[in-house]
Amino acid sequence: MPKTIIVSNRLPVKLKKEDGKYIYIPSEGGLATGLGSIYKEGGNIWMGWPGVAIEEEKDKQDAIENLKKSNMSPVFLTEKEIEEYYEGFSNETLWPNFHYFNQYAEYEERYWQAYKRVNQKFADQLSELTEEGDKIWIHDYQLLLLPALIREKYPKISIGFFLHIPFPSYETFRLLPWRRELLMGMLGSDFLGFHTYDDMRHFLSSVNRLAGIGNSHGQISLGSRKVLVDALPMGIDYDKYATVAADPETLEKEVRYRTLIGETKIMLSIDRLDYSKGIPQRLRAFELFLQRYPEYKEKVSLLMVVVPSRDQVGKYKELKEEIDLLVGRINGNFSRMIWTPIHYFYRSFPLHALSAFYRMAKVALVTPMRDGMNLVAKEFIASKLNKKGVLVLSEMAGASKELSEAILINPNNIEQMVRAFKQALEMPEKEQIKNLEVMQNSLKRYNIHHWVKLFMERLDYIKSQQLALQTKILDEASQLLLEEAYRNAESRIIFLDYDGTLTPFHGDPQQASPDDELKNIILKLSENPKNQVVIISGRDKETLERWFGQYSLDLIAEHGVWLRLHGKKWKTLAMLKDNWKKDINDVLEDYVGRTPGSFIEQKDYSLVWHYRKVETGLGELRTRELTSHLKYLASDQNLHVLEGDMVVEIKSSEVNKGRATQKWLKDANAEFYMAAGDDWTDEDTFKAMPENAFTIKVGNTPSAAKYSVTDYSDVRKLLISLCTNKKEAIT
Ligand code: GDG
């Protein structure tokens, strides 16, 4: 049975040696929770490094056996690999470059070589686990080369990739000596997800500039393979944070901390030690705030948690020293007997303690210089059960694109930060509640489970698009097959579009009328008593009647509004006037699901998709996608898709060729079915045909048809060969 394999640098568990034995510490991180619903199921697997260099063969075997019980497969890395691939290339080359700290980036050839070797190691191990039909989801910047390495071995497999950190602009990315190899590595994926529209845009621009490959609505054509790129902001396990915030253990901790700290208002910050987090800038802003507004002395304290990280590495060591100095200076200058301006912890805390901090904080300061998303911002909001609190959020964090009710700041603008601190502390409760409510509702909906589901749906979607692209050219062998099926059938149904399918002309009715060759084909085809021929066209009924009224065939005009059966009177294909709404609503729901801030308005005779609260740029992109998506369901006379001011409106209920085909076919029972058409309106006809039908697309754009031919003359040749079939030729 096909399975899903998650691959990330780290497993959701960490091995640690204690008293000569390895113990397993599970990760509480959001990703581990979200992906739990996948990797713990059936034969699915999570593959990654267990967080420690294991040397002994026996220990490795034990780890493999133990982890297998929890559907995990460890990739063992040596000390040297960890130093060069992980700490080196991943954290000292890619991390600074992707976070716009180029001055910190190391361009070391030996790091690059190690990065390539370890990605190959992951690929080798992954190949052993993989079988055709599996889905693979690769995570983050440590494994950028892996998608292409797997693609080489398994050309047809589904590969998704998600980048958790920002993707930099082309001008920054191009500084990497190995930029092209990195991009081509990523492009081994079928679907690439980023936190924000800007990240996605930057990636597409690099693909364009460095590999010369363009895109259409986020789809890149790599030869015959299509790659989808999209913005998919990661959510949190909302219920978990809301539940822990109400847990008695958290409340007990809150009371204890409050007693120790006193009644000052708390401003909270929680970060890993990293230069991308803007910790010194925040401290300087807090210092200036106390100088500028001395009335806040004794009234406000900063509770600052910095989680230790890489502090033996040069840049991190310097950062730690800078923070220590700043905290010392501020506390030294401002402290009073009964008041400490900054409570600074260089350590991590258990979840309940963290939750107590979130509850206590009046204001959360999330002010990174650059951050892929930042989950702390979201966790703070989910923990605010009383809906009182204010988030000050850097516009450089991915989260700012969704949390527009926060006070947004530029972390380089110290004056603005100082003003934001004051505004946050003085915000009326009513406004706090209003803002938090909006953000909580959004985070509840776009939670981690939604994110995982959506990722998998997008991966499946592009895979199905790729399959649809595999429409076969109607070669000699397939034509023989078709002719044989035709010959052997006692009853046949043949749907033919007109413009572009039977004639080269579109538009001008003077030019498009059937020529003698076509008239002859139609005559022979329709005279055969075994055949039921249906001309299905966008043309009006008068034109079709003028051209084909004399033949023994059926006519469907105006994309399915009118039907004329064998010379009888025209009748409309009556529909319930609201019938179309469900289909369109499903499409719109899908877009709402992928576009935080958007929503649907239901009107009696129309549906409206609003995107005025969506991240700038993303709304416009989705509109383009949506309108092209809706083309399949709209037709000139029936559904109208209108783009307005930050809205897309779909008006009126009518029918399309697919519905008309379905209605026409309802009680049909033939031995041979065929349909030919050239544009998007005919796709609905193809989809409505029975499984065993011969569906033929004229032209080479993606289609749901089984076969394709180059132009109308091929259709004519095919029809001539059918009607001049020796056994059946009507002369
Ligand atoms: C990447 C991207 C993106 C922190 N201190 C403690 C603790 N934490 C938890 C928080 C939060 C997580 O760590 C930090 O999440 P971030 O999103 O801020 O950053 P990363 O996980 O480093 O990294 C980032 C993310 O991937 C997801 O795509 O948002 O931009 O850099 O969950 O709660 N947890 C506990 N004690 C602590 O002291 N228990």
Image (cartoon, grey):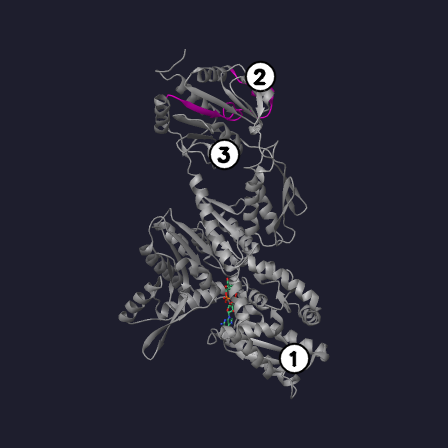
Q: Which residue lies under the disc numbered 1? A: 264
Q: Earlier in the sequence, mark 2 or mark 1?
A: 1
Q: Earlier in the sequence, mark 1 or mark 3?
A: 1
Report the front residue among 17 and 33. 33
The amino acid pointed to by label 3 is Glu
Where residue 179 appears, as percent x and y from the top left, is 47, 56
Label 1 near ligand 1 (CB < 8 Å): no
Q: Secondary structure at mark 2?
A: helix
Q: Quadrant location of the C terminus?
A: top left
Direction from residue 348 to residue 269 in the image, left or right: right
Q: CA distance from mark 2 to mark 1?
A: 87 Å
> Hey, which residue is sitting farthest left in the picture?
58
Q: CA distance from mark 1 to mark 3?
A: 66 Å
Report the front residue among 407 and 166. 407
Q: Secondary structure at mark 3?
A: helix
Report the front residue among 542 and 667. 667
Q: Residues within 10 Å of mark 3 (few under 14, many from 20)?
A: many
Residue sitting at 54 percent across and 62 percent down? 373
Q: Which mark is residue 612?
A: none
Label 3 near ligand 1 (CB < 8 Å): no
Q: Residues within 10 Å of mark 2 (few under 14, many from 20)?
A: few
Where residue 479 appears, as percent x and y from the top left, is 37, 26
Q: Which residue lies under the disc numbered 2? A: 546
Residue 607 included in the magenta stretch of the image: no
- Above or below for 369 versus 261: above
Residue 144 visible in the snapshot: no
